[in-house]
Amino acid sequence: MAQLVDVSPDTGELPRIGTPGRRWGLRRAPALWIGALALVVGFGFVLVSLAFNDGRLFGPLDDVYIHLQYGSQLGAGHFFRFNTGDDISAGASSMLYAFVLGAAYAIGFHHTLLLAFAIGFNVCCFAVASASTCLLATRLLHRTPGIWAGLLVALSGPLAWGAASGMEVGLAMMLVTGLLLTFVTEQDAARFRWTPVVGALLALVRPEGLILACALTCAVLWTLWTRRRLAGPARTVRRAVWSLLPAVAGVAQLTFYKLATGTFSANGIQSKSLLHDQPEFYVSQFVDRAGATLRNLLGIFLGFSGQEFTFPGGLLVCLGGVAYLMLNRRLRPLVLATLAGLGGAVLSLSTLDSALLHELRYFQPFLPLFVVFVVAGCTGAAQLIARARTRRLALHSVLAVVLAFSVVALPVWSVRYARAATAIRESDVSYAAYLRGNVPPDATIAIKDVGAVAYLGGHHVVDLLGLGTNGFAEAANNEIGSLYEAVRHLPPERRPDYFATYDTGPGPSMKPMRDVGVLEQPALASFDVHAPEDSRGFLMVPFRVFTVTKADWSLVDNGDAAPVPGDVRDHLNVAYLTDEKAHDYAFLPAQDGLQPFTSLAREGDVIDSGRHILGGEEFTLHNAVPGRAATLTARVAMHGTVPEANVLVNGKPAGKWVREGRDSTWETYTFTIPAELVDSDTLHIEVRQPRPVLSPYPDYISYGYWLTQ
């Protein structure tokens, strides 16, 4: 009968191999060699990219240039201002990394040198992470699995891709592995001097890093509690307070976001989270979309997809490694905390609509822990073999096969990296160069992929997706009508003079802006993206055609004028988010799941935005004169077969409003509110469907409401 060997019959614990002392010092050499190997691999990726791009260095993501812009602004003394003179914004996904880049800029790394620093710095962090993985696995298991774990990280194509990308992946990876390594190093003495420090840095480098850091804090507190009699009450309390440093760092970061931008969420979260990326939030829809992401992740880490992140069945071996490490009572707090932190991070990242993009770069910093658990699973399986020599041979053989999957895929990942950089060169970087040479330097440019244009173009930019420009993420998620309103309500001197955009996602299509004349035709310039796809048919940019167009704002205020005579007491501009919030506007959906996306239209010299309504609306109008009849005027484009709606004023029925559809862009409809219902200066109005639950529903585009008396 097979049984685990080398397990204490008294405690059930595995043998402790990485004991402290002089013997531990002799075992650092493999980690150093592994770190050196990771450097070779990381910079090898860069050399392949240079070969693809005629010896010039480019980032493989536009997001890299967003961080370079924030870093250069920080280094120049403009604290988290994407453009000089802008308000503070939270478009950098990593606060700590922005400070690192700011420090580099301040000491002389400018322009392409700052990109070179970002890439070189993260590749060096990748090397440290590889060495730390070796040391961590040695502490948890023994020397041989430690070396294999380090090799698997150093020769990982996805991790080399992320580290060489110039994003914060390498830095986050180093802090993830460093956090667990400092914990196991300080655990025996129960004196956690450096674990909270590393955890605090991890909390500042990525939002999901805060989750793992807080989970490890729980393991620290548990360890301190179990050793409280040895340390004494006073010392235990002091150590426990110090261990809360990661949570303090996380709270401080969120507080900064709230004070500086008015929301606890970074702009990237507002733009990309499934909690915010549509006008209406539905729990069922959220669960369905997040569940689809989790199912895709399951397939990737089971090794059944084409992304070459692991070998077939990798996740199952990983779970086996977790079970094997749990046999060691001393390691249980660490393993449980790591599982909780990883689970929380995965769930958090699964709420992003971009979670599976960019080669899973959000998940890459945690992959070394996946590798450690995989190696532990292979080690545990080998322990089932009784003979020591056979056990060693089996362990080396299995891990050699695992490593072979990484080594075979490594050239593929290097080519993916180079082609991604080529795609950014052919698109965002090229457009930045064109704009720099063909658009007046004092012009303001609105753009979707904002990083390279802002960093290399030298113009003041408006980020239509809301990463660098506050308030635009929500507008873009409501589609083109709300985005148009957000742009036109900028101060006239800050309105974009040019739009450098594309019609595909992310963000809404610009076609309606062209159709109504806000974007002049013909375009100033139009570019086709000629970068080749990779073997999977992927291109790093989401568009094939990019246009530069001059803006015409001459008609943008005509939509606010009342279409009927009378003393206008209030006006609700539907689709303008600020105005909707001021009037407590809400969509009354005919059924769950319907979205009131916004659109843009023009009739004569009037341009207006509206919402597509299936059901009804409610809102509050102000400044009415009590006791006097009022007229409610609506600009509406009716569709479908149900023209009537029930109107309630301050909760009281006011009658039926029939709005027959006509063959026109929109029509103006009026409804008289009796004087007896105008019982205050505030009127809460509900326009509801006549047959609740039953189809067909009122189907129309609502552009605005005016209250006149």
Image (spheres, grey):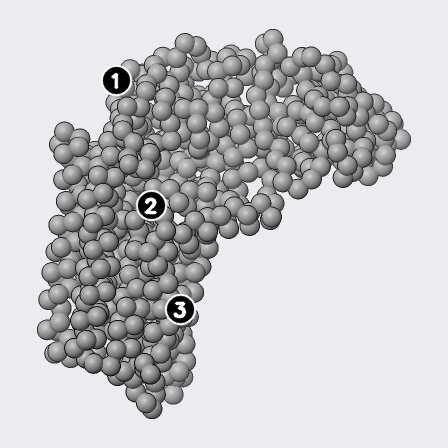
Q: How far from the left and from the top, in percent, is residue 690? A: 81, 32
**Number of on-image labels:** 3
Would you name the residue on which mark 2 appears? 306
Q: Residue at x 62, y 25 (%)?
A: 610
Is 180 placed left or right of 297 in the picture?
left
Q: Quadrant of the C terminus?
A: top right
Is residue 41 among the parts visible in the rendering? yes
Residue carrying label 3: 337
Name the residue located 61 percent from the left edge and 11 percent from the top edge.
Answer: 603
Tell me where residue 82 appears, x and y as whole percent. 36, 35
Tell me, for residue 386, which label it has, or none. Answer: none
Residue 260 or 452: which is nearer the viewer?
A: 452
Instruction: Mark 2 vs mark 3: give the one in front.
Output: 2
Where disc 2 sits, the SS reads loop
Q: Is residue 409 above or below residue 625?
A: below
Whether 4 is drawn above or below 674: the answer is below
**Gap between marks 2 and 3, in whole Å?**
31 Å
